[in-house]
Each structure stands twice: as C-alpha cells, then as structure tokens.
Image: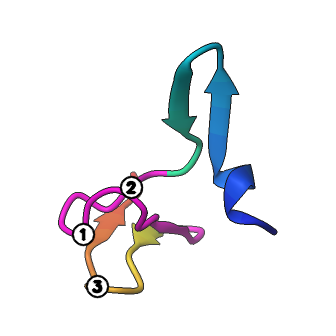
C-alpha cells in the first residue's frame, strides 16, 4: 500500500482519508483497531465508543 492511497484528491484540494495524529501533525496517521485509534510514533490513543 503506497502513501498515495492515504489521500483523496479532488480538484485542487487534498484530504487525508485516515485520521491524523494531533500531537505529531501532518503525515503521521492513526492506526485503526477494533476499539481504538492509536499513533505508533508517540502513543496517542483515541478510544471508540
């Protein structure tokens, strides 16, 4: 899976398909687990409800 598959291009705008880590910033995506989303770089975790 290439990095280009993480983004959606529409006209002149680019939007990330996955959630971006709020601590690390752009380019660092959150991994999707069954009950949470987590960053592998800094350990930030968002639990799903």
Q: Main secondary structure of the magenta part?
A: loop
Closest to the observer: 41 or 10? 10
Question: Could you tell me which quadrant the N terminus lies in?
Answer: bottom right
| Position in image of residue 32 (x %, y %) | 56, 66
The residue stretch that appears in magenta: 19-34
Task: Classify residue 32 as left or right of residue 30.
Answer: right
Q: CA distance from mark 1 to mark 3?
A: 10 Å
Q: Residue furthest left?
A: 23
Above or below: residue 13 compared with residue 32: above
Q: Are marks 1 and 3 in contact (CB under 8 Å)?
A: no
Label placed on residue 20: 2
Q: Identify the image's colour scheme: rainbow, by chain, secondary structure or one colour.
A: rainbow
Q: Residue furthest top?
A: 11
**Is residue 28 magenta-colored?**
yes
| Helix, strand or loop for disc 3 | loop
Mark 1 nearby-residue class (10 Å; few <14, some 14–19, many ≥20):
few
Residue sticking out furthest to the right: 1
Residue under numbered circle 3: 43
Mark carried by residue 24 = 1
How far is the residue under mark 1 from the one under mark 2? 8 Å
Residue 8 is labelled as none
**Is there CB contact under 8 Å for labels 1 and 2?**
yes
Residue visible at 59% across and 43% down?
17
The structure residue drawn at horizontal position 18% and vertical position 66%, both measured from the top left corner, is 23
């Amino acid at each position: 899976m290439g990095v280009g598959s993480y983004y959606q291009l529409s006209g002149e705008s680019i939007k990330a398909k996955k959630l971006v880590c709020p601590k690390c910033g752009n380019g660092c995506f959150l991994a999707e687990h069954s009950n949470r989303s987590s960053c592998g770089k800094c350990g930030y975790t968002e639990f799903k409800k």
